[in-house]
Image (cartoon, grey):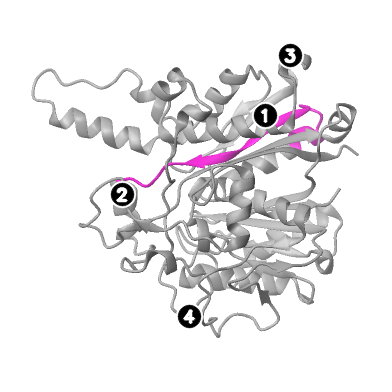
Amino acid sequence: MTRVVVTGLGALTPIGKTADEFWQNSIKGTSGAAKISYFDSERFRTQIACELKDFDPTVHLNRNDIKRGDLYTQYALYAATEAIQDCGIDLATIDPFDFGVIWGTGQGGMKTFEDEFDNFVKQDYNPRFNPFFIPKILVNMASGMISMKFGLRGINYTPVSACATSNTAIMDAYNYIKFGKAKMFITGGSEASITPACIGGFSALKAMSTRNDDPTNASRPFDKERDGFVMGEGAGALVLEEYEHAKKRGAHIYAEVVGSSMTADAYHMTSPHPEGLGASRCMLNTLKEAQVNPEQVDYLNVHATSTNLGDLAELNATAKTFVNAENLSISATKSMTGHLMGAAGAIEAILAIKSINHNIVPPTINLNEQDENIPKNLSIVANEALEKQVTYAMSNAFGFGGHNSTVLFKEV
């Protein structure tokens, strides 16, 4: 059977601009939340977010990359460059048709859309749009730009499943390699949705925290006083590779992908199924594919965004899946990064992989008083990282529309 491994990582997050910096700050319990600086947010109920700090695209991008790419595409190129460099591949030595790109985003070029439309409305004479307007807003443009930058001619497309998107991308890359359709993929997701329309829209849904006077404590999954999520931005990139191909070239292997699944809640546009039926089946299907017993899983990075309904639904699903959960440690790292929407699954997959490499589980910060409705058999890693042996690490990502996705990684 074809095995698939992870040989490269790249991250651009509110708490770290490389995969290693991201990991170090996550195990320290660092919060990336602050008052929004990108625009005047005073008119909104929510005025806080997890923005990128001092982002300099020229570290990895050239002038054309920046000019032709919306922020979400710039973030994608930035993280993808780190991951490809990290995997150590000499692109001149491989068939470019064996290396594909599957890259996800939930919102696409929202900043470009808002800025260009605003400029158009304000122009008094001969108003027009920038000629790059349409290409920059397309949700598939990041995957296309990555392939162009590195000359990758294999399978190339963008799945969209809201906040489950980058997990979906990872799963698709994994399956295509198993099917023999490619040797390598750069996969993951990016999001740049800290914009007036996105903040305003999610504020209208009353989905985001309004703890504006205390931003670093605002994202608090599982806490009794949680009041919604905090928006984040950035990108996560993984190089997936066929095991024998990676072994032959002497690549460093971070972990093996051993299972994945997607299901649907078929319940509500924005709310998860309260009993977590779809989420539980998604995790069970993943375990079945991997031929792993629930008791073998050491760490679960949950989707948990810090909303009242979502956190409990996911943990109800987890309790159904892991009936004997004595060995399972759970953490919600959105407490530190905020919710990166379509990029959330990718950055959380990186933390799951790093937990295997370092035998450390990052914490759920801001968990001061645990919600009494959380199933009693589940163990949440609260406020401080936990050192333990991690052989199997699972990562969940769920999205509006009832999309559920799960990926399972194993130590190699």
In space, the residues marked 1 and 2 are separated at their CA atoms by 32 Å
| Quarter of the figure with residue 6 | top right
Q: Position of residue 248 (x, y in %)?
A: 90, 27
Whether 142 is drawn above or below 62: the answer is below
Quick one: label 2, few (<14), some, or many (20+) residues within 10 Å?
A: few
Of marks 1 and 2, which one's residue comes earlier in the chain?
2
Of marks 3 and 4, which one's residue comes earlier in the chain?
3
Q: Nearer the viewer, residue 132 or 176?
A: 132
Q: Nearer the viewer, residue 145 or 412?
A: 412
To which residue does mark 1 refer?
85
Q: Label 4 is placed on what type of residue?
A: Lys
To which residue does mark 2 refer?
37
What SS does tag 3 mark? Answer: helix
Whether 253 is drawn above or below 349: the answer is above
Q: Is residue 135 left or right of residue 145?
A: left
Region in magenta: 175-195
Residue under the image location 46 percent in, 31 percent down: 57
Of marks 4 and 2, which one's residue comes earlier in the chain?
2
| Quarter of the figure with residue 168 | top right
Residue under the image location 45 percent in, 52 percent down: 232
In space, the residues marked 4 and 2 are separated at their CA atoms by 29 Å
Q: Position of residue 117 (x, y in %)?
A: 24, 32
Of marks 4 and 1, which one's residue comes earlier in the chain?
1
Q: Label 2 is placed on what type of residue?
A: Ser
Q: Which residue ends up furthest to the left in the rendered image? A: 124
Q: Label 3 is placed on what type of residue?
A: Ala
Of marks 1 and 3, which one's residue comes earlier in the chain?
1
To which residue does mark 3 refer?
92
Q: Is residue 193 magenta?
A: yes
Q: Label 1 is placed on what type of residue?
A: Gln
